[in-house]
Amino acid sequence: MTTMGAGMDGKVVRRHGTLLAATALAATLVLTGCGAADDSGSKDTAGPAAQAPAAKGGEANRDAASATDAEGAAGAGAADLRVDQRAIIYTGTMRVQVDDVDAAAREATAVATRAGGFIGGDQRRSADADAVAELQLRVPAPKFAGVVEEIAKLGRQQSREINTQDVTEETVDLDARITSQRARVDSARRLLTRATSITDLVSLENELGRREADLASLEAKKRRLADLTALSTITVSLAGPAAKTAGEKAETGFLVGLKGGWKAFVASLTVLLTVLGALLPWLVALGVPLGVLLVVLRRRRKTPALVGPVSAPPPPVPAARSAP
């Protein structure tokens, strides 16, 4: 009996444990379902109210990002415009020693022409080994550097100087002044059409002429700047093998002075002989007849003195008588 009681008590204990475990699992599931329902309900209830600010915030962020991108793009574009649209005047001076000055001058002219430019000036000195050619080339600003490099390859470059002048502010100022001056001219023209007296008419005509003259001066300056910025200037000196550079020092000393004096003497003697050769035909043509005439005149003066009449002897003087 004791053994059977103990077995029944064990079965009862196991059943109560199983029941408690099942009850705890059911409670857990119920609580989990309620929590899920509460969560879904809260999400559904707060969805429109919570999503609207989130959407607005997202749109605001997108707008801010777009504005930032636009400002960045605008800043980049402004920077590009500031670099690309600057008005810069390029000028260059270079000296190149070449073997044949004339051939090098023709090649430099061809280089400028191929670049879309032209020759602004051409000066040549001598035709020997010390010949020098001064060329002024006008080439488009974008081709400036390329033309300089091509000309440097014509011979042995002795010197190069490149200068730039930024006239952007001056150009902008000229544009503003031209716009303002045109408005003033138009205003003067309108007032001129409303003049009612001769005095007003004359005064307005004078004022209109002055304003138009100022406008023409500003437009001329603008055209000049536009020409200088559109076409760069390159002054090229092509020197022969024996041409001296401008930086060479003058030689001094006794021998140098003697050599210079001898050259001056020979040059003076050459000039004197040239003048004498030019006067010799006139001296022969006029001097010979004049000399003959002088000789004839001298002979005529001497002939009467030689054949003149013989003078008669003086009468005799009576002798003095003696006293008785």
Image: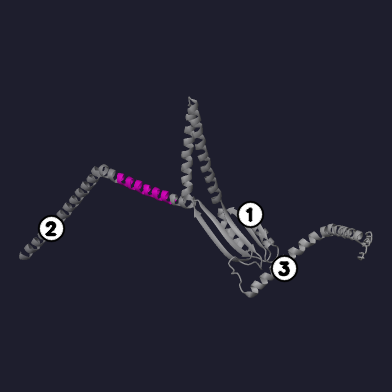
Q: Quadrant of residue 312?
A: bottom right
- Kindly identify which residue carries mark 2: 15
Q: Say which label, 3 or 1, has the lower sequence index.
A: 1
Question: What amino acid type is highlighted by mark number 3?
Answer: Val
Query: What segment carries the magenta color?
Result: 55-76
Q: Nearer the viewer, residue 48 or 263?
A: 263
Percent x, y of residue 137: 61, 55
- Kindly identify which residue carries mark 1: 121
**Helix, strand or loop under label 2:** helix
Q: CA distance from mark 2 to mark 3?
A: 151 Å
Q: Nearer the viewer, residue 22 or 42?
A: 42
Q: Are marks 1 and 2 in contact (CB under 8 Å)?
A: no
Give the residue furthest to the front: 324
Question: What amino acid type is highlighted by mark number 2?
Answer: Arg
Q: Residue at x 24, y 44 (%)?
A: 46
Q: Say which label, 2 or 3, has the lower sequence index.
A: 2
Label 1 neighbour load within 10 Å: few <14, some 14-19, many 20+: few
Q: Residue at x 74, y 66 (%)?
A: 269
Dominant SS type (magenta): helix
Percent x, y of residue 168: 48, 50
Question: What amino acid type is highlighted by mark number 1?
Answer: Gly
Q: Quadrant of residue 132?
A: bottom right
Q: CA distance from mark 1 to mark 2?
A: 123 Å
**Helix, strand or loop under label 3:** helix
Give the residue furthest to the left: 2
Tag in front: 3 or 1 = 3
- Kindly identify which residue carries mark 3: 266
Q: Is residue 262 left or right of residue 161?
A: right
Q: Residue at x 22, y 47 (%)?
A: 37
Q: CA distance from mark 3 to mark 1?
A: 36 Å
